[in-house]
Amino acid sequence: MEKILISGCLLGQKVRYHGGDAFCDDLIIKKWQQEDRLIAICPEVSAGLSVPRESSEIVGGTGIDVLRKSAKVLSHTGFDKTEAFIKGAKHALTVALKYNIKIAILKKNSPSCGNTTVYDGTFSGTVTAGSGVTAALLKENGMRVFNDDQLHEALEYLIALEAY
């Protein structure tokens, strides 16, 4: 049975920057929980960032640029959190490799977890195309990353994986 890496906030864990969650009350996730497939992570908390914490955005690029050291993750007051975000991404990758995970369901738009869009670094609520730091690292290592609006696509991918 394939395990699935999932953002802890989507399961109701109070790990988001504002101290809340992003609980995703979806039948697909409930089914995967019942099947004991889900491995919850929060890259930011695993890197030692507090709850609550200042909001952060990627400035000067996207997650892949942060990994390549050509962009940074800054808090809204300008504090550089780049190394913590990289540390959290590496921890998520370690967990994924331990469980031979091929699928991740991560929180959209997050500077760690966004898989197709992230906030643009202006702290204005504007999103731009690209992945967060953790999503980029997981993708670089061959994992398929979906967000909380792509659960049906993730389910289709899981069915295809398990058909082989």
Image (tube, rainbow, N blue to C red):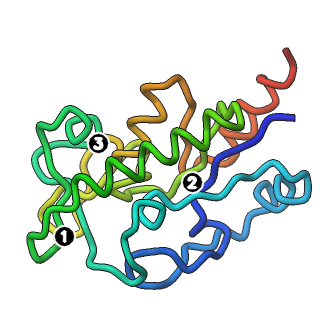
Q: Is 102 placed above or below 42 here?
A: above
| Vertical side of 64 occupied by 53: above or below | below
Q: Distance between the residues labelled 1 and 3?
A: 15 Å
| Residue that badge 2 annotates | 149
- The answer to whether marks 2 and 1 mark residues whose Cβ atoms lie closer than 8 Å is no
Residue 127 screen position, x and y as percent:
26, 56
| Label 2 SS | loop
How far is mark 2 from mark 1, CA to CA? 26 Å
Q: Taking 72 as reference, is 118 left or right?
A: right
Q: Is residue 42 left or right of residue 54?
A: right
Pick the quarter of the image with the C terminus: top right
In this view, which residue lies farthest toward the right?
Answer: 35
Residue in view at x 56 percent, y 43 percent: 146
Mark sitting earlier along the chain (3/2): 3
- Check disc 3 and report its element: helix, strand or loop: helix
Q: Tell which of 12 and 52 is nearer to you.
A: 52
Q: In which quadrant is the N terminus drawn?
A: top right
Residue kind at label 2, given as amino acid type: Asp
Residue 76 place in picture, x, y as percent: 15, 74
As drawn, 41 above or below 20: above
Q: Which amino acid does label 1 sit on?
A: Ser
Q: Mark 1 points at which residue?
A: 75
In the foreground, 34 or 101: 101
Residue 158 position in % (x across, y down): 76, 33
Count of labels in the image: 3
Q: Mark 2 or mark 1: which comes first in sequence?
A: 1
Q: Residues within 10 Å of mark 3 (few under 14, many from 20)?
A: many
Q: Going 40% across and 60% down the picture, which residue do you hit?
A: 47
